[in-house]
Image (cartoon, grey):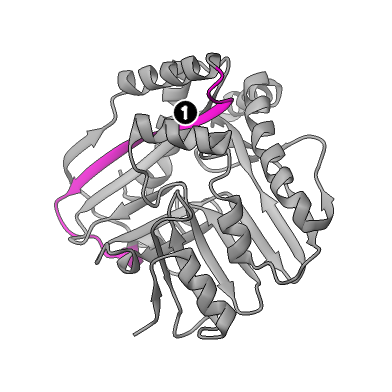
Amino acid sequence: MAAEFPSVAAARAALLTGEVTAVTGAFGFDSTGKAALLAPHEFGETTPLRSRPVDTVVTDRDITPAAVHADRVRAVLDAIDEGRVGKAVLARTLHLTLDAPLDPEALAARFTPGSDAATTTAFAVPLDAAGRVGHWLIGASPELLVRRTGRVVTCHPFAGTAPRGTDAVSDRAAVESLRASDKDLREHAFVVDSLVDALRPLCCELDVPDAPRIESTPAVWHLATPIRGVLADESVTALDLAALLSPTPAVCGTPTAAAADLIAEIEGSRDFYAGAVGWCDASGDGEWLVSIRCLELDAAHTGVTTWAGGGVVAGSDPDAEVAETEAKFRTVLTALGL
């Protein structure tokens, strides 16, 4: 049986002492809290999973109502006006009950490149180490939290979003609107500035573009900024960096602690949503993604919980924030064949 680690600290210690040669898995929105990390028996590249049709019938559905989410956005706007936060990311939750169990591997394959729901990197993580026996975290995140290769560190934050258009003309209009959006540019700047502030003390070199670029998933357009640094101290591992940087303002807000407290007041616990998923080896190299565009499959494999969120800053429109969540739910719903 593979060694399991219920916390980042336990996994870090096992890597440091040489007890294990690599760890992989996920940790939650609170990187100091629950984790589902393990030391794999084998570690390396495999052939891609084959995507297969999923015959899914939903027998029950429960979602955060649009009106409730809009009211929550207004509450965050009030908190911004009061000076409690500069930005907070709010998410809606969708619970689905299915008529038959899903196979985790088959479902993960629905998120892989070539499938309708593909974004960048798909993942499937058993959550047993966190005490959620039989549960899986499955998805496809477009957002690289951090990658370490030797002393080179790369981040690729996403923040600022526009739904894809229904045709070439409306799709191009969505791009131009996002490019010119003061609200989205400010939202993105919060994220980049936070990552740069965290990385600067650790890096002897740091390269940050002056302006974001626009990247797409099948459902939405994003503002994105590739950040590259060179570590001054090679003992800082990919797992160290992931725990330090998570949660970023892209999924939490700023200031981080105040935004996290506000999210907890409004949403409750996020568990593994908006945490990180990835790997780190004994050399310190590794890659971690922000765990968005994902779902948690329950132990019976018939219950699905998924989330979709968006950043709220001064000037955010509650109705537009609701529409953004609808667009972001599409990745998981498409993977489920819905």
Q: Is residue 135 magenta?
A: no
- Residue in the image at 38% along x and 19% along y: 70
- Residue in the image at 73% along x and 45% along y: 196
Q: Is residue 99 left or right of residue 111?
A: left
Q: Neighbour class for label 1 at 10 Å: few (<14), some, many (≥20)?
A: some
The magenta segment is 83-106
**Where is the C terminus found, in terms of image quarters?**
top left
Q: Position of residue 180 (x, y in %)?
A: 70, 21
Q: Position of residue 240 (x, y in %)?
A: 61, 63
- Residue in the image at 73% along x and 48% along y: 226
> To which quarter of the image does residue 213 belong?
top right
Q: Is residue 97 magenta?
A: yes
Q: Position of residue 168 (x, y in %)?
A: 60, 30
Q: Which amino acid type is shown beneath numbered disc 1? A: Glu
Q: Is residue 281 left or right of residue 319?
A: right
**Where is the N terminus found, in terms of image quarters?**
bottom left
- Residue in the image at 52% along x and 38% along y: 257
> Can see residue 51?
no
Q: Is residue 94 above or below residue 99?
A: above
Front residue of 295 and 274: 274
| Count of all numbered marks drawn on residues in the image | 1
Q: Is residue 122 left or right of residue 131?
A: right
Front residue of 100 and 195: 195
Where disc 1 sits, the SS reads helix
Q: Position of residue 96 (x, y in %)?
A: 23, 44
Q: Name the residue that disc number 1 marks.
A: 324
> Can see residue 128?
yes
Q: Is residue 20 above or below residue 102?
A: below
Q: Is residue 226 above or below residue 192?
A: below
